[in-house]
Structure formats: structure tokens, C-alpha cells
Image: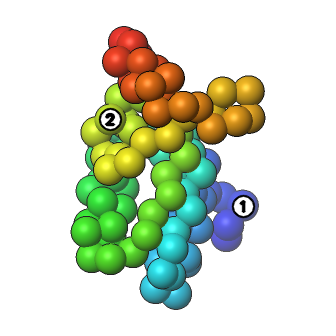
Amino acid sequence: TGDDLSGGEAQRVCLARTLVTRPEVLLADEPTASLDPAATRILEHTITGLARGGTAVVWVSHDRSQARRIGDHRFVLVDGRLAAPEQADRYFDEPG
């Protein structure tokens, strides 16, 4: 049953159910938070493939290295507001 799934398994099932509907836009809010590194790489590969195929993807993450790795366009929120481009660039230039 669904109650027997780990956090990562439940997250993957939820994503699979969503992808079956072939959405035009996918909002992924911290989609790899409960995944191990191998599952994270698979999910990143899957989602970037969807994006290359024309699905619009909004990927929300606190993981700067992940955002650098997979994001075509990156935006930063500071205190709930969209940071200016130069402030966002500085954020991504910092280690982490």
C-alpha cells in the first residue's frame, strides 16, 4: 500500500502519476529532497529530457549546484522577492 512507501518512493510515485497526464507545465518543488544520489541523477535526467522535448518545467530547489547543473534560467528569491539579475548571479557565483 501507499503507507508502506519510503519518502523517496512516494515522491517518485507522485511524479509518475503526474507524468502520465502529459502536462504542458510541470512544477517540481524540491523534487529530489527525499531521493538518494542515484535516484536524483535519474530524476534530473528524466526531467531535463522532458524540458528538451517541450514540457515547461519550473524546478524549485535550495541546492545551488543542482540549479547550476540543470537550470536553463535561474531565479533567486530573497525575503520572498525576486532578486535582481546581478544579485542572483552573485548568489550562484558563491560556493555551495
Seen from the viewer's position, the closer of residues 38 and 4 is: 38
Q: Quadrant of residue 81?
A: top right
Q: Position of residue 32 (x, y in %)?
A: 48, 45
Task: Please say whether residue 5 is visible from this viewpoint.
Answer: yes
**Amino acid type of the residue that numbered disc 2 sits on in the rendered structure:** Arg
Q: Secondary structure at mark 2?
A: helix
User: Does 55 sit left or right of 78 as displayed?
Assistant: left
Q: Which residue is mark 2?
A: 68
Q: Residue furthest bottom?
A: 21
User: Does 9 sit left or right of 4 as displayed?
Assistant: left
Q: Secondary structure at mark 1?
A: helix
The residue carrying pointer 1 sits among few (fewer than 14), some (14 to 19) or many (20 or more) residues within 10 Å by Cα, namely few
Vertical comparison of 69 with 86: above or below:
below
Q: Which residue is mark 1?
A: 3
Depth check, mark 2 against mark 1: the one in front is 2
Kindly report the distance in space between the C-alpha atoms of the residues bearing marks 2 and 1. Answer: 34 Å
Which badge, 2 or 1, is on the more N-terminal residue?
1
Q: Quadrant of the C terminus?
A: top left
**Amino acid type of the residue that numbered disc 1 sits on in the rendered structure:** Asp
